[in-house]
Amino acid sequence: MNAIPRRSFVALAAASGLGLGLTGCSTPPASTASTGPDTTAVQLNQIGYLPGGAKWAAVRDVPANSFAIVDAATGQEAWSGPLGPARHWEPAQETLRLADFSGLRQPGRYRLQVAGLPPSAPFDIAADAYAALNTAAIKFFYFNRASVALDPVHAGVWARPAGHPDNHVLVHPSAAGPGRPAGAILSAPKGWYDAGDYNKYIVNSGVTVYTLLAAWEHFPQHFKAQDLNIPESGNGLPDLLNEVLWNLDWMLAMQDPADGGVYHKLTNKGFDGIVMPHEARSERYVVMKTTAATLDFAAVMAQASRVFAAFEAQRPGLSGRMLAAAHRAWAWAGKHPAVYFQQPADIHTGGYDDNRLADEFTWAAAELYITTRDDAFWRALPQPLPKMEPPGWASVGALAWISLAHHRDRLTPAADRQLIERQLLGSAETLAQRWVQSPYRLAMQQQDFEWGSNAVALNQALMLVQGYRLTGKPQHLDAAQAALDFVLGRHPSGYAMVTGFGTRSPLHPHHRPSGAAAQHPPVPGMIVGGSRPGGNDCKAPYPSQAPAKAYLDDFCSFTTNEIAINWNAPLVYVSAALQALTPASALP
Ligand code: 9MR
């Protein structure tokens, strides 16, 4: 498998020795305490850094005054510097000292040393530091494909038979319409499993597909030649777009042809057991059309329409179909502006319910405006504009401004360019200031440690990247780098939070194919949700209830150790952005 970097095989081989031996039962695998090097004494990016990028580590509070960076093989000192003052970081309830070695630009493999502490995990300084990570983060989506077998050529040891054909899906009573009564059968195959579960949700697909297509729109050079080793590789489309199409094809089938409304989800009644996809037997349903799902669909189809306009030869007619679908969805939402998701009594899977839709209207209007250049869509932006915040599945307003800013040179005179820049810069600047002031040099605050905190950090980075793209301010890029460092091991838990990467990474993610085939290491390239206090989903106690440390690498911990498509997407975006934007050897 060419998508998995050499180094990750080391971690995978170590992991495979654990032998959890769980197949097809509903009891989650037992926790296997991770022993190994102490990665909490010196917390740093276990994958590595770009030569021209900011490089920070956080160090347990010891009396030493300085730190050294040594060659990992020879022990020879390559850099030394003073340790920052001891400062308390409340989210970790810990006092730490910072080490800044941004000035070390010489490629190599290193460790950080401080007298009185064990040496750090090894890390690289390399021009392609995030290339393999980025490839694996996209390849995860292939591994999570529904309705298709993964073959050994493309999936290696993670090959598996096809599951969830989704060509015989029942219309749930909540979704019944004139042309499709309850119990009618429709076909909506393909798509990605949402997360550790095997259901497919339009709302979460919306923000995910957007983020991946935005990565393409902003950094096409990065993706053009990327080979994911997926079945479509070499077909004339970039692989990132090939992968996204797997989900877009499914999304298109979720629109009711009778009226343009979009079903909220395609789901079982309850979650599947811990089985491989082909062992799952539950009936599948489409459940109620909602305004949120329909607007997210409209936004993504408008965006995809302009992306695939450039690939008319490879997929004739697709771009036009997508735009028509977006128009019909927008019209449905206009007629049904407040149909909120309500979980039917007999359905027990994820909700993705959201009753604040001004941001969804903003996003859909903006994407349709950019693609059609029809001023009516600019005028359709809600007043007052919804509050700006980093994106998430329930908060998509920022996506509007990111797209508008990226396409600002092709907008009609109706667009207020200053407003567009102000919207993004205000948000990026706030985050950059938090990064400057943070004792941990991270924009994350106590309240950001919610379900999926790793993706909160990465979506903050995504906003900071927009600030950098508009202003070129190094602080914005450095603060984004800090967020990537955080999920790759400069984390109070000591974990690099992506399966298969780094010295210490999750071995027991809440991901059904990984749990059901526990004789193999987990599927690689998946970022787990991350620290979040208050979980009582496991019998074993969490190691800490400090917000930034409340993480447990156990299958049972669905609140901190699940994976999800909307969390991997910003990992793809941010790792590509830093790789593409970091000056080769800049920094003052
Ligand atoms: O990511 C979602 C998180 O923001 C919510 O708080 C949580 C509870 O509603 O649900 C999360 O999404 C899950 C979804 O509902 C079902 N598939 C797995 C998702 C990740 O845990």
Image: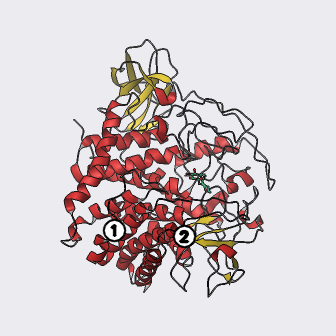
Could you tell me which secondary element the residue under label 1 belongs to?
helix
Q: Is mark 1 within 8 Å of ligand 1?
A: no
Camera-side residue of 372 and 19? 372
For the C terminus, the image quarter is top left
Residue 543 lies, with reference to residue 194, above or below; the image says above
Q: Earlier in the sequence, mark 2 or mark 1?
A: 2
CA gap between label 2 and label 1 equals: 20 Å
Circles 2, 1 touching at the beta carbon (< 8 Å): no
| Residue 335 shown left or right of residue 23 in the figure | left
Which sits in the foreground, 127 or 279? 279
Q: Position of residue 203 (x, y in %)?
A: 52, 64
Using the rendered image of the protein, determine whether residue 473 is visible from the camera's viewpoint: yes
Report whether residue 224 is seen: no
- For the point 76% across and 68% down, the residue is 282
Residue neighbourhood size for the residue with mark 1, other residues' Cα within 10 Å, grouped as few (<14), some (14–19), many (≥20) = many
Q: Give the structural element (helix, strand or loop) at label 2.
A: loop
Q: Which residue is mark 1?
A: 366
- Residue at the right extreme of this rendering: 25
Q: Residue at x 60, y 30 (%)?
A: 545
Left or right of 478? Residue 526 is right
Q: Is residue 27 left or right of residue 572?
A: right
- The residue at the far left in this view is 413
Q: Amino acid at mark 2?
A: Thr
Nearer to us: label 2 or label 1: 2
Its colouring scheme is secondary structure
Amino acid type at circle 1 is Ala
**In what quadrant of the picture does the N terminus appear?**
bottom right
Question: Residue drawn 32% across and 59% down?
Answer: 384
Q: Which residue is mark 2?
A: 290
Crowd rating for badge 2 (residues with CA inside 10 Å; few <14, some 14–19, many 20+)? many
Residue drawn at point x = 53 percent, y = 40 percent: 496
